[in-house]
Structures are given as C-alpha cells and as structure tokens.
Image (cartoon, rainbow, N blue to C red):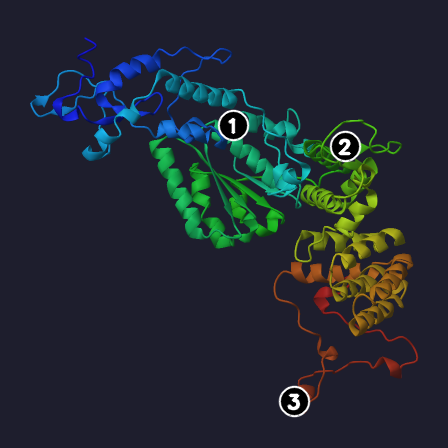
C-alpha cells in the first residue's frame, strides 16, 4: 500500500517538489521515503512538544519576531486526497506529489543536490522548534514609559470611565438606588437631555451607556450637532426603522451639543422619539428651557448634572496619577524615599499641587486632567538631565500651567443672567462684599462693562429711588465714565458705583407705584376713559370752542392749594402711592 500512495505517474517522475516539514526541494520519486525519515525525527529534549503551525504570523496573532516562520507558510500545500491527472486518465490513488515551477532542463542538473540527509532534516526541525518555543515562552512586553502613556489622545479622553462604578461626582443623580442608575443597569434607557456645565460628565455618561448597549445588542449611534445635518439625522432614523422592523433591535441616538440644532432640526426627532423608533440622549451646556424645543422637552426627561465638587475632582486626579505611575508626596515627605530601583527617573507630585488643581479647574474634569498632563509633560521636558529630586510637580507648576482660575462664564448663556441676578440681589441686600464678588465674576469673565453699568442705572431707580435721589446721578455718571475709557480701567468705576448703591438706603415706592399703574391699565374692562376736557390742551380756536381747557385752574396763580380733579370720573378715588 505504501508503494501505491504517492507513486508518481509517468508525467511526474522527474518533477521537483517541496517537503511540507522542512521545506527542502527534492525529486518527486523520493518524497515518500524522505517524509518517512523527516516525520520520524524525535523531538528535541527540553523543548515542549507543540503542534506545528503552518499558518502565517498574521493569522496566528504572532509578533514580528515570528517572521522566520513565514517561509513555512509560503510552502506549497500538500492536500492528502489530491488526485493528479495522468495521460491515461484520473488516478485512483491519492498522491503527495506537487509540481514544481522549475523547467525540465534544470531538474536533472540539480537532482542530486536536492536529496537531503537526515541530519539536515533534524537541524531544520530543531531550528523551527526553538523559534516556536521562544515565541510561546517569550518575555512579557515592556511596560510603557510615562512619556509613552501621555502620547496620543489627551489624558482627559484616556481616563474616561467605562462603568458607573468609576463615574464620580454625580451622586445626586446617579448614586446608589437612584432611579436613573436603576434604569441604566436594567438597560431600560429613556429619552433624556443631559444638562450641565462643561466637564461635568455628560459625554462620559453617554459613553458608559453606549458600552452597556453594545453588550446587550442595542445599536448606539453618535452625532454632533456642530457638524451633523438634518440629512444625517434622517439617515440614522431610517436605519433605526430597519433595525427595529427586521432585527427587533433598539437604537439609541446620542446628539452632543444638541442646542446647536435649530427648532426646525429638532422637530425631526419628534415623531420617532414619540413612537420609540429611537431613544434620544442629548447633551447641552445651555438651559433646555430656552434652547430645546418645548415639544421635544415633553418627550424627554431633563437630567441636571452639577459642577463637580473639589472632593470629586481630587478623586479623579488621583485616579489619573495612579494610572500614570506618578507618586504622590505628602507635606512632610521627600522624593526618593521609596527606594525603588527603576530605569526611568520617577515622577512625583505634591498633594498640595493636586488640591490646588482641583480648586482651580472650577469643577471641570477635562480642564483638570489636561492641566495635569501639561504639567507632567513640562516637567519631563525640563528634567531629562535633572536628578530625581527635580522631577517633582509643585503647586507653582500647576498655577503656571493654568495661568489663572478657570472662570465659568458665558456672555450669551444662562450664566450671564445668573450672575447679574446675583449682583442685583446682593446690592438690594446691602452686602457690599457679595456685590463686589459678582461684579468681578462678570468683568473677569469677559462681560461688557456697559451692560453692567446699564443695570446699575436701573437699580438706582428701582431699588433706591427717592430714598437717595443722588443714587441715580451716581449710576449715570458711572455709565458715562465706562463709555469714555472702557475696560480694564473702568473696573474701579463700576466697583465704586456698586459699593455706593449697596450701602444706600433702599426704597421701592416708585417701583411699586408704577407697578400698580400697569396692573390697573392691564385689568381695565371696556374702553379707557377719555381725558377730562379741563385737562386738555387748546392750541387752536376750534379746540377752545369745543371746551378744551375750560375751567382749568393754573396752580401757580393761587396762593392757596387748588382743588380740582386730575383723574377721569371713572377713576376717581383710586390710589397708586
């Protein structure tokens, strides 16, 4: 039977073939005997027995160091049941013979050189097994250096949490046993609008929802309102309809900066959120009451995310420091105390520096993490040739990186109205310190000083009025001075006016009296009464003939008070003051 298997036909007796084990080229007539010797070679002592893999390093996931094995994968295949055709017809026996690409003239010339000995086969197999063992039992990949860890994406993106357990700072909304956390854990996600300041975790929460959705076969699509169009939204909705119809698969659509869509674009979501084709998750830094369509708000729940506290910021920064392998120094600790033998110069950060960074970033995790990354990269660049003691991030390095406190203020957003309201109420309460603070928040945040000055003019009449008649001229003068010199010189002028108005006596008599007048006119039933004839002006003879001005008493002519009516008869007896 052995003579029948692989016996070459008349057309293949002088063909050259490759050995599938050692990749040597030899005559087809000698392939069977060579395979018997090659396959009977004993395994090398001390090397674990492994199955030969003829697949390429790319298919097996091997590293580039496994490239020497690639020549085996490039060898011709030897199908065990290949039946080559002969001149007499198809052969009934399977054959190992494979035709070579060499020409007939070169076969006889090199025939003897292609008959290997057993020692050659043994050496080939030994080399192959040693290479395989070194790949299987190779060393673990070298740990990345600090510079390599910071390379690529910003640190804020690398440290983005992937689970609710790592999500920090929003315990009021996503704490244990809260309704939203329970819904997210059960994958019963409603349509929601995430509203909060920058860096509070809106996009991170959406990424956590996306990861859970993919694990539960829910389609998650992300769009940004800054670049997406209405056609992009319609395409996503069309795909969601097909997924729901054919695959019974839900679709969650996350729209970042959803307030950038106008009212017409937001209307595109209405019917599909209503019928459940998509679950909408929107993220915005603007007040949804002003920026989101009312009809869309009624179909979504607004989730308010607060600014991150200092404690939450410290926890986030500490998590980043630990992931980078940076060591934290307490107040009484000096660098180099650990005694660890490492090839790379260790990096240290003072605990005071982290606390300062947590305060300066104003509850913005993105600002805090990127500020930490900037400080670390600056110390790495400056301390390449320095000693271990110089590789310390101190408080002054953090302040230098941020330059100044990160002030949250938006001249066109809700914070604009929040700060001016706080200033108005602080002056009304005669709190000079609070008044100056809110004034500084607006001016240092980039507010137009003339806008503040106009509000002070209004306050002088509304809240002080006749209690101090000089308050109004003071406010008007401050407005004119700001108009003349502008910022930053006009800051003390506004501060002077704010302090004057805060300590001035308060009276809302004028404001209240005029408010009653507006209510009277608004609630009057029927046509408004005409002006009495004796109060009308009579510039022409015709008007005098009609009785205009008749019976009017000119008060300066009388030494005693004059009694006459100045209200219409229908309004007689009404009091506004």
Quadrant of residue 444 within the rendered picture: bottom right
Give the residue drawn at x 46%, y 45%: 269
Quadrant of residue 239 within the rendered picture: top left
Q: Earlier in the sequence, mark 2 or mark 3?
A: 2
Residue 356 lies, with reference to residue 340, above or below; the image says below
Tell me the CA gap for discs 2 and 3.
97 Å
x, y percentage for residue 475?
84, 67
Q: Residues within 10 Å of mark 1 (few under 14, many from 20)?
A: some
Residue 288 lies, with reference to residue 525, above or below; the image says above
Q: Quadrant of the N terminus?
A: top left
x, y percentage for residue 86?
11, 24
Q: Earlier in the sequence, mark 1 or mark 3?
A: 1
Give the residue drawn at x 80%, y 63%: 456
Tell me the CA gap for discs 2 and 1.
39 Å
Between 116 and 480, the residue placed more toward the observer is 116
| Badge number at residue 542 | 3
Question: Circle 2 sits on which residue?
Answer: 327
Give the residue drawn at x 22%, y 22%: 28
Disc 1 element: loop
Question: Circle 1 sits on which residue?
Answer: 187
């Amino acid at each position: 039977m052995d003579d029948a298997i692989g016996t070459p036909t008349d057309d293949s007796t002088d063909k050259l073939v490759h050995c599938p084990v050692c990749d040597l080229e030899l005559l087809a007539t000698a392939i069977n005997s060579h395979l018997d010797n090659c396959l009977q070679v004993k395994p090398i002592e001390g090397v674990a027995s492994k199955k030969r893999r003829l697949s390429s390093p790319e298919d097996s996931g091997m590293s580039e160091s496994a490239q020497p094995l690639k020549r085996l994968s490039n060898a011709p295949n030897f199908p065990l049941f290949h039946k080559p055709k002969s001149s007499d017809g198809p052969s009934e026996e399977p054959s190992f013979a494979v035709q070579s690409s060499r020409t007939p003239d070169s076969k006889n010339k090199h025939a003897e050189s292609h008959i290997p000995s057993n020692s050659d086969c043994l050496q080939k197999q030994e080399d192959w097994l040693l290479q395989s063992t070194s790949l299987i039992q190779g060393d673990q990949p070298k740990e990345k250096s600090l510079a390599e860890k910071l390379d690529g994406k910003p640190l804020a993106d690398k440290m983005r949490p992937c689970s609710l357990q790592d999500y920090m700072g929003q315990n009021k909304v996503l704490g244990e046993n809260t309704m939203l956390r329970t819904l997210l854990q059960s994958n019963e996600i409603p349509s929601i609008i995430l509203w909060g300041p920058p860096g509070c975790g809106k996009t991170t929460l959406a990424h956590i929802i996306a990861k859970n959705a993919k694990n539960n076969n829910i389609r998650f699509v992300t769009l940004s309102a800054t670049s997406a169009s209405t056609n992009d939204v319609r395409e996503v909705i069309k795909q969601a309809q097909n997924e729901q119809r054919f695959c019974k698969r839900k679709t969650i659509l996350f729209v970042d900066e959803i307030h950038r869509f106008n009212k017409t674009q937001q209307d595109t979501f209405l019917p599909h959120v209503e019928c459940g084709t998509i679950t909408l998750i929107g993220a915005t830094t603007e007040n949804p009451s002003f920026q989101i369509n009312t009809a869309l708000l009624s179909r979504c729940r607004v989730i308010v995310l607060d600014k991150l506290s200092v404690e939450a910021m410290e926890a986030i920064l500490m998590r980043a420091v630990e992931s980078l392998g940076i060591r934290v120094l307490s107040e009484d600790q000096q660098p180099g105390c650990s005694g660890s033998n490492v090839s790379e110069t260790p990096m240290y950060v003072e605990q005071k520096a982290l606390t300062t960074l947590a305060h300066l970033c104003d509850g913005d995790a993105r600002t805090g993490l990127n500020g930490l990354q900037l400080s670390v990269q600056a110390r790495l660049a400056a301390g390449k040739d320095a000693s271990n003691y110089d590789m310390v991030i101190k408080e002054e390095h953090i302040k230098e990186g941020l330059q100044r406190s990160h002030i949250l203020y938006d001249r066109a957003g809700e914070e604009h109205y929040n700060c001016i309201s706080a200033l108005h109420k602080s002056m009304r309460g005669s709190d000079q310190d609070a008044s100056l603070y809110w004034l500084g928040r607006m001016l240092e945040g980039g507010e137009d000083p003339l806008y503040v000055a106009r509000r002070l003019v209004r306050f002088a009449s509304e809240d002080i009025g006749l209690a101090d008649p000089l308050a109004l001229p003071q406010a008007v003068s401050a407005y004119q001075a700001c108009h003349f010199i502008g910022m930053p010189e006009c800051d003390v002028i506004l501060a002077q006016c704010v302090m004057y108005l805060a300590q001035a006596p308060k009276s809302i008599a004028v404001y209240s009296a005029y408010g009653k007048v507006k209510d009277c006119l608004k609630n009057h039933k029927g046509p408004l009464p005409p002006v009495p004839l004796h109060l009308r002006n009579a510039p022409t003879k015709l008007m005098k003939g009609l009785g205009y001005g008749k019976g009017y008493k000119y008060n300066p002519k009388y030494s005693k008070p004059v009694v006459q009516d100045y209200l219409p008869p229908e309004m007689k007896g009404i009091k506004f003051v």
